[in-house]
Amino acid sequence: MGYVPNTFVADLNLSQQGENDLANRFMANGWTVTTTQDKDFFSQYDLTVSRRGLEVNVEFKHDVLSDATGNACVEVSKTVNGIKKKSGLSATTAMFYVFKFGVKDDNYYAINTSALRTYIKNNAHVLSRTSGGDGGRSNLVLIPLDTFKKVIKPILLKTE
């Protein structure tokens, strides 16, 4: 049985479990990890990973519905009271986005945030858009998973 959306709290907990697993994978490979889970409404990034003087901010997204939809869903903004606001991809300061797709795939896919923004901008005419999440206020771009994995070519962070 696939994932059934439940509540904001349940979705947040599932996402934080994935974020913690990602942090553990980085630490197992010698990275120091700092999380922003203790910060309320912090939209800039989720993790800071550092090693040998290199520090990188990471935005983590667990797209649990991708098993059913076949798409990678990217939040690009929000519309609140008819006004478009920065959110998701337009708000993050992270250098990399890391996605976990569905509940069956244990792998993580990392892509440079600038490359993801450029891909969406250059392909806006062919990508589907929808709204959802947060009371339907999130503006979302859908990228077919095959396209995401083959054309955009994210870095695959495999299960060890």
Image (tube, helix red, strand yellow):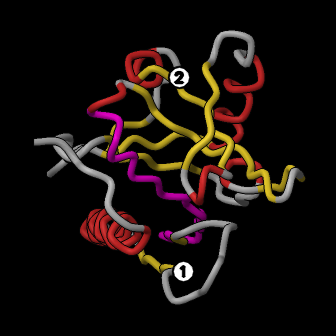
- Quadrant (top left/top right/bottom left/bottom right) for the N terminus: top left
Magenta highlight on residue 38: no
Work out whether mark 1 precedes mark 2 in sequence or the reverse, and give the earlier one: 1
Q: Residue 36 — which label?
A: 1
How busy is the neighbourhood of tag 1: few (under 14 within 10 Å), some, or many (20 plus)? Answer: some
Q: Secondary structure at mark 2?
A: loop
**Relative image position of residue 95 (x, y in whole percent):** 65, 53
Residue 67, compared with residue 18, is above or below; it is above
| Label 1 element class | loop
Main secondary structure type of the part rendered in magenta: strand
What residue is at 50 percent from the left and 15 percent from the top? 151
> For mark 2, what is the residue?
152
Q: Give whichever of 5, 127 is nearer the camera.
A: 5
Residue 145 % position (x, y): 40, 24
Name which residue type carries label 1.
Thr
In the picture provided, is 81 more to the left or to the right than 142?
right
* 78 and 19: which is toward the camera: 78
| Residue range (magenta) | 49-67
Coordinates of residue 155 in the picture (x, y in percent)? 42, 36
Q: Quadrant of residue 92?
A: bottom right
Please indicate whether residue 64 sits to the left or right of residue 73 in the image.
left
Q: Residue 96: image x %, image y %?
A: 58, 50
